[in-house]
Image (cartoon, rainbow, N blue to C red):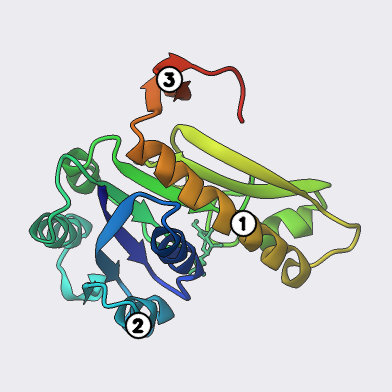
Amino acid sequence: TLPIAVLVSGSGSNLQSIIDRIEEGALDAEIKLVISNKASAYGIQRAKDHDIPYRVLLHTDYPSREAFDQAMVDAIHEAGVTDEGLVVMAGFMRMVTPVFLKAFANRVMNIHPALLPSFAGVNGQADAADYGVKISGCTVHFVDEQMDHGPVIIQAAVPCQAGETEDELGPRILKLEHRVFPQAIQWFAENRLRIENRHVELRVAGRPCAGQP
Ligand code: GAR
């Protein structure tokens, strides 16, 4: 069972999808800690409802990004997520520094509501709708030092209708997020993800598998 820490800043619907898959037995992970950097995040309530340990760490309480990241690293380690575990950013709207990434090298995943490298940032759905793209979607990737950037694990696409706004597109993308994020975490739990030359390879029976299943 993979020990994971989940970082949230908002509603936590992706956190909920992870909780649900674990409770159904479809995801072999245990959430050891939920961290929110916002006191008002509904994700905290979701953790409480499922008896999952949680911490609210406010970045405004720390003198630097590095100090905040170190506090998160300490909390995650104390909760029992170390070299064996995974950190999952589920709507965590803050970039992390090398302090964090060195502590969890190639063990931090993020989900983004657009087909990266298009429309990184905090308004991925709106930016895609405004641009008028005909296809958008979501991306799960390993995190590096740039925003919404790093080796891609899985993407899922949705067609966009002409004139569609973020209000229409966003929920359709979110539905896909709730499917692919638990899937990516399960692959990690099964030790099937390898990073080669900044590309993620999915393994089947220990061998590379062609394409994206
Ligand atoms: C999700 O759409 C996620 O992809 C996005 O925030 C939302 C959080 O929703 N993340 C980013 O935009 C990262 N740049 P949730 O709190 O209901 O899971």
Question: In this view, which residue lies farthest toward the top?
Answer: 207
- Name which of mark 3 and mark 2 comes first in the sequence: 2
User: Is disc 2 placed on a helix, strand or loop?
Assistant: helix
- Name which of mark 1 and mark 3 comes first in the sequence: 1
User: Is disc 3 placed on a helix, strand or loop?
Assistant: loop
Percent coordinates x, y for residue 65 in the rendering: 22, 58
Q: Which-is-in-front pick, marks 1 and 2?
A: 2
Instruction: Determine which quarter of the picture holds residue 46.
Output: bottom left
Residue drawn 78% across the image and 46% down it: 135
Instruction: Determine which quarter of the picture holds residue 213.
Output: top right
Q: Amino acid at mark 2?
A: Asp
Q: According to the image, label 3 marks what residue? A: 205
Q: According to the image, label 2 marks what residue? A: 49
Percent coordinates x, y for residue 59 in the rendering: 24, 70
Q: Which-is-in-front pick, marks 3 and 2?
A: 3
Residue drawn 18% across the image and 62% down it: 68
Q: CA distance from mark 1 to mark 2?
A: 29 Å
| Label 1 near ligand 1 (CB < 8 Å) | yes
Residue nearer the viewer, 75 or 128: 75
Residue drawn 30% across the image and 35% down it: 106
Other-residue count near label 2 (Cα within 10 Å), few / some / many at <14 / 14–19 / ≥20: few
Q: According to the image, label 1 marks what residue? A: 124
Percent coordinates x, y for residue 94 in the rendering: 37, 60
Residue nearer the viewer, 80 or 199: 80
* Res 144 visible: no
- Name which of mark 1 and mark 2 comes first in the sequence: 2
